[in-house]
Amino acid sequence: KSIFIVFQAGVNPQSAGQLLSAITNAINSQFTEVTILISSPGGSIFDVMNIAALIKSSPIPINIHNIGQIDSIASVIFSAGTKRFAQKNSSFLFHGVMANFGQSSLTEEQLGERLATLRRDRENIAKNVSDFTGIDYKIIDDLMKKGGIISSEEAKNIGLVHEIVEAKIPAGVQIVTIA
């Protein structure tokens, strides 16, 4: 008994809550497999880490399929999948972690703390993607430091994607959409 979750949103507290609920409901409803069809511009590091933790701890397989773009921190959600698929024309965007300061004035110490936090976040993201996929940490860290978009074929070559295949939702399965 399978369920498909279509997640086409930025990751924020609301969309993350909806995705966490959909996954939890699938587990509680005794589905035997979840497939998440995802295209996301990324978003909140905190929320993504919570989603990835649930996916990795799930008692049932949760497969992830890139149906468009996996940008930024959304790569951690993608990486957490039991099996990871991508459509032929999908892509993955990697970049460093950003900080918004707005009109803030920071002391030297505060700026140093913020820099340390940014480095920790980048290292945690790279470590999670590496741990989840088996890709060497340095490869992911370098992708994040350099920034750039890789194709589904390049993602398959480094081990981020198991298989390049078009998404197909079987007739009769339950579908949940989060947009």
Image (spheres, rainbow, N blue to C red):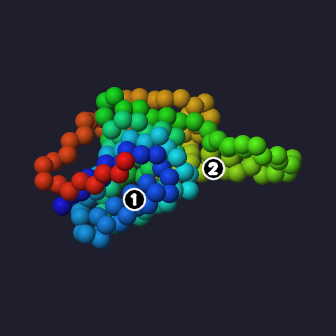
From this view, report whether residue 86 is shown above or below residue 3. Answer: above
Q: Residue furthest front?
A: 103
Dot 2: what SS? helix
The image shows residue 37 at horizontal and vertical percentages of 32, 46
Q: Residue at x 23, y 63 (%)?
A: 32
The image shows residue 86 at horizontal and vertical percentages of 33, 37
> Mark 2: few, some, or many residues within 10 Å (few <14, many ≥20)?
some
Q: Quadrant of residue 31?
A: bottom left
User: Can see residue 158?
Assistant: no
User: Which amino acid type corresponds to the residue marked 2 in the rendered image?
Assistant: Asp
Residue holding disc 1: 18
* Front residue (pair 6, 84): 6
User: Which amino acid type corresponds to the residue marked 1 in the rendered image?
Assistant: Gln
From this view, report whether residue 31 is shown above or below residue 94. Answer: below
94 with respect to 166 (left or right):
right
From this view, report whether residue 32 is shown above or below residue 38. Answer: below
Residue holding disc 2: 121
* Front residue (pair 152, 66): 66
Q: Residue at x 56, y 45 (%)?
A: 126
Dot 1: what SS? helix
Which mark is nearer the camera, 1 or 2?
1
The span from disc 1 to disc 2 (Cα, nearest Å) is 24 Å
